[in-house]
Each structure stands twice: as C-alpha cells, then as structure tokens.
Amino acid sequence: MCTLFNGVYQDMSVLLTGHTGFKGSWLAAWLHLLGANVVGFSLPEPPTTPNNFDIAGLHEQVVDLRGDVRDATAVVNLIDTYKPTLIFHLAAQPIVLRGIAEPQLTFDINVNGTVNVLEAARRVGHVRGIVVVTTDKVYENREWPWGYRENDRLGGHDPYSASKAMAELAVNAYRSTFFAPQTYAQHGVALATARAGNVIGGGDFGDYRLVPDCMRALMAGVPIGVRNPLSVRPWQHVLEPLSGYLWLGARLLQEGQAFAEAWNFGPREQRGLSTREIAEKLIALWGSGTWTHTESGYAKVETGLLRLNWDKAATRLGWQPVFTWDEALAEIVAWFKAYQAGADMYAILQAHITAYVQHAEALGLPWACNR
C-alpha cells in the first residue's frame, strides 16, 4: 500500500508563511487534504481583494495567524509555540513592477523576512525541514534560448529579482554554516530552495500579472490589455510547482541531506510561450473577448525570454509536470467560470487537486501513488 507523498504529511505540523497568497492558499488547501496540521502566517490583510483564501473559506481548514515575517521576535515566538516539523516559506513581495515602485519594502520582506525564518528555525529547534520558495528570476538573465540550470549564475537587474537572488544567497549561507548536509546528524535540519516561474491558476487576482488581467477583463467583458505580447515565459499551472514543493518537503524529511539544495520546477513544454499566445488561448476557451497591446513605463524592465531546465528534478526526485499549457489554461477558465457562477469554491479547489493527482498517478509519478 502506498499514499500520496509517501504519507509524510498525515498529522504533521506544517508552518506555511504567505498562506493567504495565491500559491500559499492552494498549498494550504492541499496540505489540509493530505491530513497535515497547517499553521498559516501572513500579513493581516490578504494581498488582493478578492482572494483565493477567503473565497474558499480556508480559515476553517488551517490555523490562520496574522503577522509579519519582518518581525523577528514574532517569527521566533511562532515557531516556539507551534513547533512545526516542516516549514514552507512563501511569504514575499512577489510582483516585479511593485518592486520597482517600492524597492526597500521588497528587499526587506524578501531578504530579511527569509533570514528571520531561518534564524528562528536555528534558534528554536523543532524544525526538521525547510523549503524556501524563490523564483525563476533569481538567475542572471542572458536571454538564452535554453533553460537555466540550478548551478547557473544568480543575478537580478530589478529589485524583485535581486531580492530573491539575495534570499538564495542567505539560504546557502545558513545551509553551509548552520545546516550543512555533512553535519546533518548533529543539527537534523534539511534546507532547500525551490525555483518556479510564472505560476498561473484559478484564484489569482494579483496586479501586473497576465492571467489575472485576462480573467478580470473577460469577466467584465472588456478588452484584455497586454503589456509585452512577445515576452516568453515558462508558464505553469499552480499545482505543478506545488507538487514539486510537497515532494521535495517529503524527501527532505525522509532523506534530508541528499536533497538539501536548490531545485527548479518548470512546465512541460520545451519552448516558452508568449503572452500573446496565452491571452489568445484564454479568449478562445472563454468563448469571447479581445486583446490590445498596451504600453507601460515599466514594461521594458521585464525580461523578454526566460526558461527553466528541470532535468535535475526529473532525474533525482522523479518529478515532472502533469498538464500541457492548454490543459492548464482550461483549468483556469473552469475555476473562474465556477467563481463567477457562485459555486462552492473550496469544493472546486478539492476537485481540481483531485483531478491533478489522478493525472499524475496515470503518468506513474512516484509522489502520486494513491492506493
């Protein structure tokens, strides 16, 4: 008999920072379905209105705590009180253009917030695994046509990208100094980072993001504004990297020192897809709509070509994405149509996760054994 993610999450105490965000809310729901005792820690106000966390009523499924990862004392008290076995650190300022408008805030949250989580885990104890989620934008962008690998040089020419690269450096410093794999028997903490880019899915209402912009326009019956129609990104459905994070977390706890490093999680397609292709496919799936090219003063700072190589995750974790890009977009349209119709959105989340797991099991992925 085998279970999802080797049954690791059943009855486990898991701390999830950023649990009210787009990715965090989906991860909170999935962890709850896996039987975990989820402690969420996010800013008092959710990042958007509306937001997936509130729409799905997830406050009923998790311990819903509000605070700020920039408050080092609060983070120490949080870990000391709830004694999580595993931490998924997602709390961040995640928007490139907001990083340009508010650079100091972006560095403070993304760098110092990460250091506070790592330092609290070091000082308090209890924690056995930490997955720090960064981004594909940690790499020094050279507009290569091939995907970046985990050992490529870090960089970041805008505040958001640089802050996430700095978070990666902070993680590496803590891993080398305090949580070294070679001394795992003494400290017992496995620390990894996860890099995924351009995550899309139902429940995303973020600003300056293509798919939310598209869905807001389609629901309102107005043209979609696209800043950079030819920009290419590694678009992937939110459940793709989340399955990678969950599988990585499970392996850290079971075989810690072997997986305590950086990991890329990318989409199924070998080529990136342009923003124009995404907008046009969403219009076709929705059944109506148009798009127009808009100009932005900040558009030119966004990278034109960016792809990830996830061979390492495929080879060593046995992970691979499940959806094709058009299947991912069909899932998104289905979520927004259900939302617009006033459906039970927690039931919709559960149904989407269940369908994704069934797809993964059909592919024979090792984490998706569900018998």
Image (cartoon, rainbow, N blue to C red):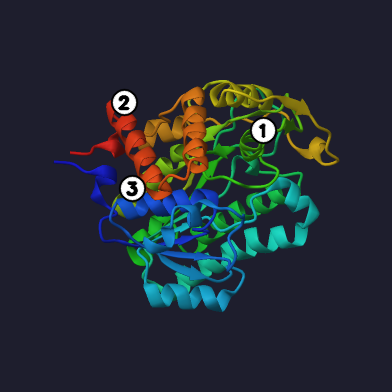
Task: Tell me, yes or no, if residue 348 can be seen here.
Answer: yes
User: Where residue 368 appears, x then y in whole percent?
Assistant: 29, 37
Q: Specify the amino acid type for callout 3.
A: Arg
Mark 3 and mark 1: Cα distance apart in space: 46 Å
- Quadrant of the image occupied by residue 107: bottom right
- Quadrant of the image occupied by residue 281: top right
Residue under the image location 76 percent in, 33 percent down: 227
Q: Specify the amino acid type for callout 2.
A: Leu
Q: Quadrant of the C terminus?
A: top left
User: Relative to 360, is 202 on the left or the right?
Assistant: right
Whether 289 is drawn above or below 101: the answer is above
Question: What is the crowding at mark 3: few (fewer than 14 residues within 10 Å), some, or many (at least 20)?
Answer: many
Sequence-wise first label, 1 or 2: 1
Sequence-wise first label, 3 or 1: 1
Question: What is the crowding at mark 2: few (fewer than 14 residues within 10 Å), some, or many (at least 20)?
Answer: few
Residue under the image location 60 percent in, 74 percent down: 71
**3 and 1 marks in contact (CB < 8 Å):** no
Of circles 2 and 3, which is in front?
2
Whether 360 is drawn above or below 250: the answer is above
Q: Which residue is mark 3?
A: 251
Residue 363's label in the rendered image is 2
Q: Specify the amino acid type for callout 1.
A: Gly
Sequence-wise first label, 2 or 3: 3
Circle 1: element type:
loop
Q: Which residue is mark 1?
A: 221
Residue 266's label in the rendered image is none
Of circles 3 and 1, which is in front?
1
